[in-house]
Each structure stands twice: as C-alpha cells, then as structure tokens.
Image (spheres, grey):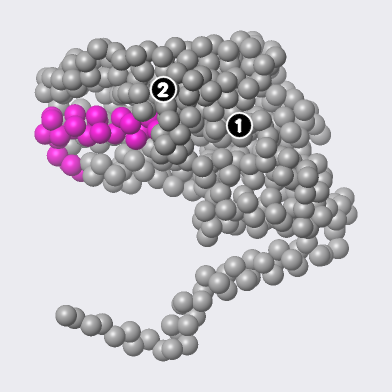
Amino acid sequence: MNVEIDRRPLWLLMLVRSFRYLVFAGLALTTYTIANLTPPEGLSPAGLRAIAVFGLSLVLWVTHLLPLAITSLLVIALLPLMGVMSSSEAYALFGNSAVFFILGALILAAAMLKSGLSGRMALIMLTLFGKTPRSLLLGIFITAAFLSFWMPEHAVAAMMFPMVLDIARGLELRPLKSNYGKALFIALAWGAIIGGVATFLGGARNPLAIAILEETTGRSIGFFEWMVAIVPIVLILLVAAYATLSFFLKNDLDNTDKAIELILEKKIALGRITYEELMVGLIMGMTVLFWMFLSKPLGLANIALLSVVALFVFKLVSWKDVEEYVNWGIILMYGGAICLGSAITKSGAALWAGDLIIGSMAGSSVAMVGIFALLAIIFTEGVSNAAIVAILLPLGLGMSSDHGVSPEIITYAIAVPAGLAFMLPMGTPPTAIALSSGYLRVRDFLIQGLVLKCIALLVFFLMATYYWPLIGMNVG
C-alpha cells in the first residue's frame, strides 16, 4: 500500500483547512460593517441594511459557498434581525402564492413523468419527424421545446436524455468525433432551454419573476398573457437555433434507419395508453386551460393545488413519488428570493442602487430595457437563472417608474433573457445533462452558443419594439 506524506508546512495546511471558515468570517464582518455605516444621501438606514443583505446573498449565490436554498433561508432570517422588515412580514412572504404555484407545477410534472405520459408524448413526436437526419434533429428540437412548455426544462432534458443517447449509440456515432452526435445533444439542450421560457411551467424563474412583480408593485402578468408575448419569440428562436446548429455542425450521417427502428420499438414496447396516463393527461390539460383563461379570478396557485389534490384523489401519484421527483430546495430558494426582492424594493434600496449603477446608461426607456436584457443574458451563463431574476428584477422594478417603463415590460426583459443560457453548464441543467453524454465538450457549445445568444438578444429586442406594441405593450 502506497502512503503519501504531505510535506507542506503546518501553517500552510492550517490555512488551507480553515480557508472556507475565514471566507465566511470575512463575509459576516463585511456585511456587519456595511449595515452600520452612515447611509449616503438618498438612502435610508433600512435601505442600507437591505443592500448589505443583498450583497451577502449575491456573493453566496454566485460562488455557491452555500446551497442556493440555504442562502435563501439565511436571507429570511437576516432581514428581520437587521431591522429591514418585521419577522411576520418576512415569513409571510415565504408563503407567497407563487411558491405554492411552483410546488403544484412540480408535482404535476412529477405525475407526467411517473405515469409515463411525457415519455409517450416524446416518442410519438419523434416518430412524426425522424425520417431523415435533418428531420430527426428537428424532431428532437421541437419535442424538447414543446414538452418544456408544460414541464420544467431540466425534467424534460433528463427524461429525453436516455432516448437521445440510445439513438446516438444505435446510429454508431463516435463520441467527440461525429458532428451529428454533437448536434443531437445540443438540440436536446437548446430545445429544452428555449421552450422553457414560453410559459410559467418551463422554469420556476418565470413565476418567481411574477411573484416579485406582484409583491413589489401590486401588478401581475397572466398565464395566457405571458404566452401571447413570448411564444412568438420562442418560435423564432427555435428556427434560429436549428439554423445555427446546421451551419456550425454539418451533417455527416447518410440515414437514420436504425434510429427510426429504435424509436418504433420503444413506442411499441409502451403498449396501449394506460388509465394513469389518460387521467394525468386530462387533469394536466384541464389545469392548463384554467391557467390560461381563469388564472386571474381563480389564482394560479389555487388552480395548481386543486389539480394536485385531484391527482391524489384518483390515486395517480403517491407521496413517495412527490418526494422523489420534487426538488424541495427550489421551493426554499424562491421563497427567500421573493422576500429579498420585496425588501430591497420597498426600502428604496433598489431605486438608489439602480440609479447609481445603471442610471447614467439608461438615458431612455428603450435603453433601460436593453441594458437589463443584456445583463440578464450575459450573467445567466455563470449564475443560476433564478438568482439572476432575484438580483436584477428588484433593481429594474425600482427604476421602472422613474424611467417611464412599465413594470411588466421590465419583468419580461429580465426573466426571458435570464432563461437563455446556451453556452456553459453552470447556467442551466439541460446543458450539463447534454455534456454528460460524452459526445461533446464544453467548447462545442461556446461559439455557436455565443452566436445564438446574440441572435436571441436581437430577436427579443426587435419583437419588443415591433410586435409588443401590437398587443398593447409599449416599451417607450
């Protein structure tokens, strides 16, 4: 047995072992010092303390020194302790209706996965497209995007990943060598990412943004209203993404006969549609219709929770299924983010900090929308998209009235670009899932991902300028 002796000096070993704790001590001291400074002109003492908590959470969210959910719990505890808001206000915000909407949506997605309905839908859609290499690639794009309209994008990527992997292996594509192999997995990731911004269900950052908007301004955006504004952008981005991928990764495959056989075998193996799949599909369809047309009078969260109860009434899921499929850390993270957003907006800190950092650049309403969209789409590559919403949206909402921008517009301008992380695995799980296939490297995402981000920003800005006014949304 080989024994390795660490010959580094004792002081260096102690420094390395204690470095994490020194960082936490430094963060605590910095936060305390900032909170106790004399507030600059235009900022209240409560606003300064809110900025201190905001700065601490920003560092922790970006560096992942603590899990995102634990950072949110820290925020909820610190805001009352530092006198930014009362304990009752802070903990009441954690019970915001958006948190329960997210919970209900996650349980509904769990029912679709557990029943096999989502897998059946994916196979049916792939059989419609997979006649040629180009149409199969398009089919993976469209299938991942469409499912991400109704399920979290990471769940769609995880569910479809084994199918795409089987297709790649069945076609005997060489890992890291085959352009078509790379394109299959990038299509899976990009399809899920783009589809995930279309509704409130593709990513919980969207209902998080709506919750921060409602809590700080009293205004809201409906489920159908969001789709009318964003789905046309999504459709254009899907075309742009497919064209970008086809340009950078030239097809090196003659036919997809083996893939078609594999997809058909999997479809046949599923057999006839089951009672559970039918009932889950019926409940999900009814839920979406209620969200689209009755969300304002009934409430998104109320509809979601009643649908969850229906799943248990018909014994379509068990509590064990819920525990297995639902990421409880997401629920905790969003509760803290809503609380922090409300605190820094209502204390006046968001307006003061936004004017200080961005105010000089935002000479017009159009410029302000463009700046926030640009910041969101850049930073989302290295930071959780939900954290980006929690960081930027309170600043944007705090500045919106002074710059003549409606709060709804600034919400779209931050929440949608924050979901478009096409380049790096840190930004969104679908990219990390695609990379785990072994068929591509990070660098395979970089150049075409950068091109697609530029296209996405241009498409967003053009649609905001020319399409949104047609549906009653004016940027200027």
Indicate the amino acid at tag 2: Leu
Q: Is residue 403 magenta?
A: no
- From what the image shows, is residue 134 above or below residue 377? above
- From what the image shows, is residue 133 above or below residue 390? above
Residue 361 image position (x, y, % from top left): 70, 41
The residue stretch that appears in magenta:
155-177
At 76% from the left edge and 35% from the top edge, which residue is drawn?
Answer: 216
Residue 335 image position (x, y, % from top left): 63, 41
At 23% from the left edge and 44% from the top edge, which residue is drawn?
Answer: 438
Return the residue at label 1.
Answer: 100
Return the residue at label 2.
Answer: 316
> Few, some or many C-alpha atoms within 10 Å of disc 1 (few <14, some 14-19, many ≥20)?
some
Label 1 SS: helix
Q: Is residue 173 magenta?
A: yes
Q: Marks 1 and 2, how far apart in space? A: 20 Å
At 67% from the left edge and 37% from the top edge, which residue is drawn?
Answer: 95
Say whether residue 445 is left or right of residue 225.
left
Say whether residue 159 is left or right of residue 106.
left
- From what the image shows, is residue 476 above or below residue 33? above
